Amino acid sequence: MVRGPVTERIEQSRRSGTSFAGIVAGTVVIIDARRGAVDGDDLVAYLDIQIGAPLAAT
């Protein structure tokens, strides 16, 4: 399944506040993260996410 690995990649970006562009479980994933601090050590990450269709061998 693709959903689990893609969801985990999104969660990694959410926790770290970092962007990502690559292939996860055969699916193109692009995450544009913007960080914003809230009350000291709290982290807010705004994510724009694009997920392509799973790639198939040709």
Image (tube, rainbow, N blue to C red):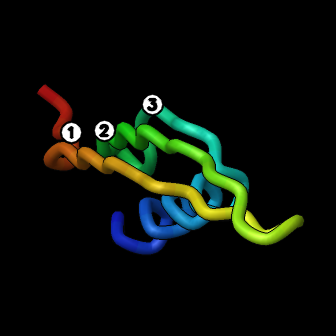
Q: Image quarter for residue 26?
A: top left
Residue at the spot 56% in from the left edge and 57% down from the top edge: 45
Where is residue 9 drawn, in percent x and y? 54, 57
Residue at the spot 24% in from the left edge and 48% down from the top edge: 51
Where is residue 54 drawn, in percent x and y? 21, 48
Residue that label 2 marks: 28
The secondary element bearing badge 1 is classed as loop
The mark total stands at 3
Residue at the spot 63% in from the left edge and 41% down from the top edge: 18
Q: Image quarter for residue 3?
A: bottom left
Residue at the spot 21% in from the left edge and 39% down from the top edge: 55
Where is residue 22 drawn, in percent x and y? 44, 31
Query: What residue type is disc 3 on?
Result: Ala
Residue that label 3 marks: 21
Q: Which mark is residue 55?
A: 1
* Mark 3 vs mark 1, CA separation in Å: 15 Å
Q: Earlier in the sequence, mark 1 or mark 2?
A: 2
The secondary element bearing badge 2 is classed as strand
Q: Earlier in the sequence, mark 3 or mark 1?
A: 3
Q: Earlier in the sequence, mark 2 or mark 3?
A: 3
The secondary element bearing badge 3 is classed as strand
